[in-house]
Image: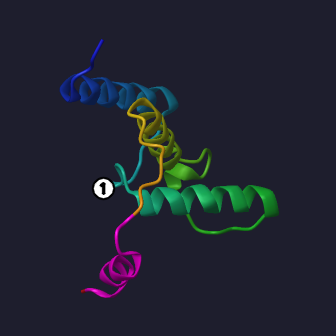
Amino acid sequence: MRISPLIAGLIGGFTAAILQALFKVFPPPAYGICIACHTRDLVNWIINHLFGTTLGMALVSKAFPVLTVVGIFIGALITTFIYKETELKQTHSPVYWFHIRNFSY
């Protein structure tokens, strides 16, 4: 069975709303899916709990870390295996592409 992007979005949205109500999570405005912020909060939460530090994080992440980054990574990994994109592809001129990717503005 194939799930359309609309259905996946609706399921994800309703699930997020239900979990937010269930766990009484009230994130700050504009804190939906922010890879930089969620990664920072996850890393800081782990370090704070392992070493007893007080690194800063959003209030929503103090009790339990936001696992958005983990979910995106797992989803990408599953998709990679489903579509068999696991083999490395060789580029024709690695030096050229290295310079294009790293030094072009």
Residue at 80 percent of width and 63 percent of height: 51
Residue at 41 percent of width and 56 percent of height: 89
Residue at 60 percent of width and 52 percent of height: 62
Q: Nearer the viewer, residue 98 or 69?
A: 98
**Left or right, residue 89 beside residue 44:** left
Q: Give the amino acid type for the residue marked by disc 1 in the picture.
A: Ala
Q: Does residue 88 lie above or below 47 as drawn? A: above
Residue 95 position, x and y percent, is: 40, 82
- In the rendered image, which quarter contains the N terminus? top left
**Crowdedness of circle 1 by 10 Å Cα count: few (<14), some, many (20+)?**
few
User: Mostly what secondary structure, the magenta segment?
Assistant: helix
Residue 25 position, x and y percent, is: 47, 39
* Residue marked by disc 1: 30
Q: Is residue 67 magenta?
A: no
**Left or right, residue 45 beside residue 6:** right
Residue 98 position, x and y percent, is: 39, 79
Residue 18 visible? The answer is yes
Residue 58 visible? The answer is no
**The image quarter in which residue 28 lies:** bottom left
Q: Which residues are magenta?
A: 91-104
**The image quarter in which residue 102 lies:** bottom left
Q: Residue furthest left?
A: 6
Residue at 44 percent of width and 63 percent of height: 36
- In the rendered image, which quarter contains the C terminus? bottom left
Q: Is residue 94 magenta?
A: yes
Q: Does residue 68 lie above or below 44 as drawn? A: above
